[in-house]
Amino acid sequence: MELNVLVLGGDGIGPEVTREAVRVLRHVAEKWHHRVRLTEGLLGGIAIQKTGTPFPEETARLAAEADATLLGAVGLAEFDQAPPEKRPEKGLLGIRQALGVYANLRPVRAYPSQLDASPLKNHLVEGTDMIIVRELTGGIYYGTPRGITGEGAETRAVNTMTYTRPEIERVSRVAFPLARARRKKVTSVDKSNVLENSQLWRRVVTEVAREFPDVALDHMLVDNCAMQLILNPRRFDIVLTENMFGDILSDEGAVLAGSIGMLPSASLGARRPSGAWTGLYEPVHGSAPDIAGQNKANPLGAIGSVAAMLAYSFSLQEEAAAVETAIEAVLRSGRVTADLRPSGAPATTEQVGESVCAAIG
Ligand code: IPM
Ligand code: MG
């Protein structure tokens, strides 16, 4: 099979974790006799520095032509005061929208060998295994009107949270089949005691649930969910929620996994006739400029994102499973980066990538 992948290293630790993810991709391709065709592009702060815009047209074209896109991270402190259009994050929102990747899957697992890496008590996190399905191309991130107007005491900022029925339906139709292949439980998270947006969300998710009678649906308010994630994370199988709630809850989920460096993600859009998804694959973590270029960052979130790419965009389930098994083997070996608090000397980013390849065999 030919794997046409666009690689966007992005900012901060993005390029170095992506390098290891690509190492693993090439290794898998060699072992299973696939051909990898990589192109590289610019997104985020690096794109602003080189082209003046965070999401250059060239990147949009390359992403449209590729079978899948692998992304590192975006964000640089030097743009913190820049206007909205000239911020790295705008590039990320732009490519998500351009690719139409409306369903963001963020699996959160507490690996047995990493329980001590979480600041939470082991008995709480043990057995955690959920997927947060975050709506990714709607809600308050994209709604209009938006902006800041006026001056002095008259200054006013507006953002708009908006969802349409089809937007809620399509992401729900990703979440329920995922539950079917797991513990058959969807928890839909909203703020329907206050927001009309959430009232529509709850109504539409409940309707879609009727198409999946074998899957149990419950609803939870987002504030309670933030608490239950820590008190009883094992109760969650699929967590289905809107864009901003999913952003916030997935960082909280990272605490259960021991480190945000562990979390992969798959952002899925249209499905081709072959069943392969249009996909953008990126670790959940940010660009972590404080440790950039030091060969210290945990590449397992990026490598896990390659596993997701193999599964969702190339339907290569055996290869995907091999990468996941290799990640677990490396975790058990204890040769992990500093964020996972290894008992011995921490491994480098590169060593972790090499160890995953070695474990794949
Ligand atoms: C994430 C990030 C992004 C988001 C930022 C960088 C725009 O926090 O992917 O979770 O808010 O979606
Ligand atoms: Mg986030």
Image (cartoon, rainbow, N blue to C red):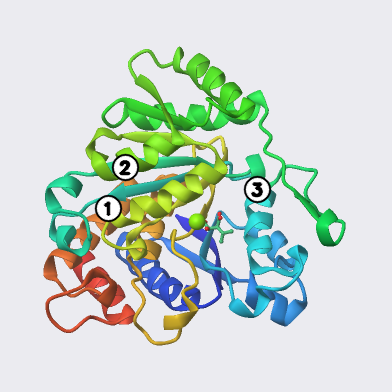
Mark 2 vs mark 3: in front:
2
Label 1: element kind: helix
Task: Look at label 2 and name its amino acid.
Answer: Leu
Q: Is residue 277 above or below residue 112?
A: above
Percent across and percent down for residue 100 are: 64, 44
Residue at image x 73%, y 72%? 82
State the residue position of label 1. Answer: 256
Residue at image x 54%, y 38%? 242
Label 3: element kind: helix
Q: Are marks 1 and 3 in contact (CB under 8 Å)?
A: no
State the residue position of label 3. Answer: 141
Q: Is residue 194 left or right of residue 161?
A: left
Q: Are marks 2 and 1 in contact (CB under 8 Å)?
A: yes
Q: Give the crowd class for mark 1: few <14, some 14-19, many >=20 residues within 10 Å.
A: many
Q: Is residue 331 above or below residue 266?
A: below
State the residue position of label 2. Answer: 229
